[in-house]
Image (cartoon, rainbow, N blue to C red):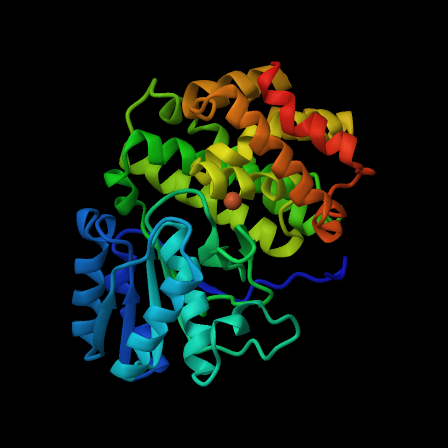
Amino acid sequence: MRKDSFYMPARVFCGDDAVRKYAGEMKRYGRKALIVTGRHSADACGVYADICAALDDIGTEYCRFSEVEPNPSVQTIMKARDYALSEKVDFVIGAGGGSPMDAAKAIALMIRHADEGADYLYTSGADGSAVPVVCIPTTCGTGSEVTAVSVLSNDKLKTKKSIPFKLFPQLSLIDGKYLMFAGQRTLCNTGFDALSHLYESYINSSATPMSRMIAEDGMRVWKDNLPVLSGEKPLDAASAESLMKAAMLGGMAIAHTGTSLPHGLSYALTYNLGVPHGQAVCFFMTGYLEAADPEDCARALKLSGFESVEQFCDAYRKCCNLPDVPEDVLRTTLDACTEDLARDPAKCAKAPFSVDEELLRRIAYRSLSV
Ligand SMILES: [Fe+2]
């Protein structure tokens, strides 16, 4: 990414009833939509009913694929693509947390490349055109609604991995009311994921004044919501809207810079042990912050409401807990995380300091000794 440019082409509408209010925007994408969701939460939080009503309002047909699992697999993408082709859909709506939105992007890619098999998803340099994608987030972490990223579980590689295509949604509709149905655990795991995007974008070799401005604003917004994440204050409509905004700003920041070492380390922890994404990423944040330039670290912590790395780590433990697995199993996986990332020089280069395997190991193990 050039240091003097900024690119985030998703059209975003935020606010009460955004899905019904701005449904007309979807008319231009075609006659029929595929709505992509997880199995339950899109019904529980009301977003699926809102999408159906919105599409009815504008006379757009739709069908639904509701089998997206957490950390969606390549097989799920291909199953949804085949269903979409049989239904002759023109565009895809991903509604839910990061998994349905990331899946929607990959499904949209594979609909456009209808003759290709699953290997296409990981073909670097291939044509990345896709049918239009609309994203509607219901959690406060991923920022997928404003990024070009689609992360899938890859059983061949035995880890999670971003597919090598830039797949920005055309449209994102953001309404805090869907977050009111998230449980405290989801709130914490996704809220800390958003914070990790803000930190990793701020402390990043691709950071620019523009991306830092967005990350700083996101940290200021995030800070006000720590009492909600720690359970000291109940979630209300204003906090829900604010947490969604922090997540969107985190997404905009990483849309420009990409994520850094904590995300790179986290994928094996999630793939091997099922540790939720935000909990897995922030497990590595203490070590990352300590390895960063002290001034950058202090500023990021202050903007997000912490006086020290230890205070951040305490909040992480209180809100997300350490991964609940026997320590010997955890240590074996942390070694795998380190080896995984050491083989990814592009991700290591996102850290604005020099990285070797010893440093990665120190970052990987740091949260165990705080
Ligand atoms: Fe993330």
Tell me if 71 is positioned left or right of 220 in this view.
left
Q: In which quarter of the image is the N terminus?
A: bottom right
**Residue 177 occupies quadrant:** top left
Up-down: is 44 above or below 286? below
Quarter of the figure that contains the C terminus: top right
Q: How many numbered marks appear?
A: 0
Find residue 113 and report its horizontal and vertical position in percent: 47, 82
Q: Is residue 19 above or below residue 318?
A: below
Where in the figure is residue 17, as x and y percent of width and height?
25, 55
Residue that lies at the very extreme toward the right in this rendered image: 354
Q: Residue at x 54, y 44 (%)?
A: 267
Residue 252 picture location, percent across and down: 55, 53
Task: Give me the residue at 33% from left, 74% from top.
Answer: 26
Task: Please identify the quarter of the rendering in which residue 74 is found.
Answer: bottom left
On the image, the x and y values in percent for residue 232 come to 34, 17
Work out whether residue 173 or residue 93 is closer to the camera in this orientation and state it.
93
Tell me if 262 is positioned left or right of 251 in this view: right
Q: Can residue 299 be seen in this view?
A: no
Q: Which residue shows up at 42% across the image and 73% down it?
A: 108
| Residue at the image position 56 percent from the left and 33 percent from the top | 333
Question: Residue 49 appears in which quarter of the rendering?
Answer: bottom left
* Residue 227 shows up from this direction: yes
Closest to the observer, 241 or 166:
166
